[in-house]
Amino acid sequence: MIKKILLRILLVIVAIIVIGLLIPQNLKMPVVGADSNSYNHNAFWHGGWGSSVVHKGVDIFAKKGTSINSSTVGIVLTTGEGGKSGKFVLVLGPKWRLHYYAHLDEIKTKRFAFVTQDREIGTVGNTGNAATTPAHLHYSIVTLIPYPWRIDDSSHGIRKMFYLNPIDYLTK
Ligand SMILES: [Zn+2]
């Protein structure tokens, strides 16, 4: 009996994971009006990044106050303020990937909101440790399902099983 229930729970979990993997990502540039000139194409895993050691995302530059839309469909897991991030939004998107938006000037969504690619979630700013740099969106993609084959011998290279390069998706 218990075995049957456990099996059923396991099947439901597997089904949820598979459904998440099947949702297409269709990633869209999150900063409205930005293009491939708005970011440094070598920004991902750039070294000398202070206490973060390497840069685990991309910085997309735009005028302060420019709208940021979610790059994928998803659910806002949390929003917050403080530390290196400044104002940030964390979205769970397709394929069990987290999309992290930081240094926002304003947060324009809330926890557990359902978002699509046309939904504004915030505006570009320079909050957190970006206070002395021009306004930009720090954008990272983190997979919850590890990709160990992506590990390399760069600094913090083991973390590449979780941190994906957003530029790979932005340039598609
Ligand atoms: Zn950054």
Image (cartoon, rainbow, N blue to C red):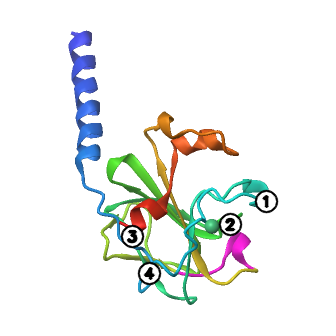
> Mark number for residue 82?
2
**Dot 4: what SS?**
loop
The image quadrant where one finds the C terminus is bottom left
- Mark pair 4, 2: CA separation: 28 Å
Q: At 29% from the left edge and 63% from the top edge, which residue is drawn?
A: 26
Q: Residues within 10 Å of mark 2 (few under 14, many from 20)?
A: few
In the image, ligand 1 is in what quadrant? bottom right
Residue 107 colored magenta?
Answer: no
Which kind of residue does numbered mark 1 sit on? Gly
Q: Residue 97 versus residue 58: which sits nearer the camera? A: 58
> Of 163 and 153, which appears nearest the observer?
153
N-term-proximal mark, 2 vs 3: 3
The overriding secondary structure of the stretch rendered in magenta is loop
- Relative placement, left or right, of 92 versus 150 is left
From the image, state whether disc 4 or disc 2 is nearer to you.
4
The residues tagged by marks 2 and 1 sit, at their Cα atoms, a distance apart of 17 Å
Q: Are marks 4 and 3 in contact (CB under 8 Å)?
A: no
Question: Label 3 crowding class (10 Å Cα cut-off): few <14, some 14-19, many 20+?
Answer: many
The residue singled out by tag 4 in the image is 35
Along the horizontal axis of the image, is 125 left or right of 4? right
> Is residue 137 found left or right of 98 in the rendered image?
right
Q: Earlier in the sequence, mark 2 or mark 1?
A: 1
Residue 16 location (% of width, % of height) = 26, 39
Range covered by the magenta-colored residues: 124-131
Q: Earlier in the sequence, mark 4 or mark 2?
A: 4
Looking at the rendered structure, the secondary structure element under dot 3 is loop
Q: Distance of mark 4 from mark 3, alpha carbons?
A: 16 Å
**Disc 3 marks which amino acid?**
Ser
Q: Position of residue 101 (x, y in %)?
A: 52, 67
Q: Which circle's residue, 1 or 4, is located before the other in the chain?
A: 4
- Residue 167, percent across and down? 47, 64
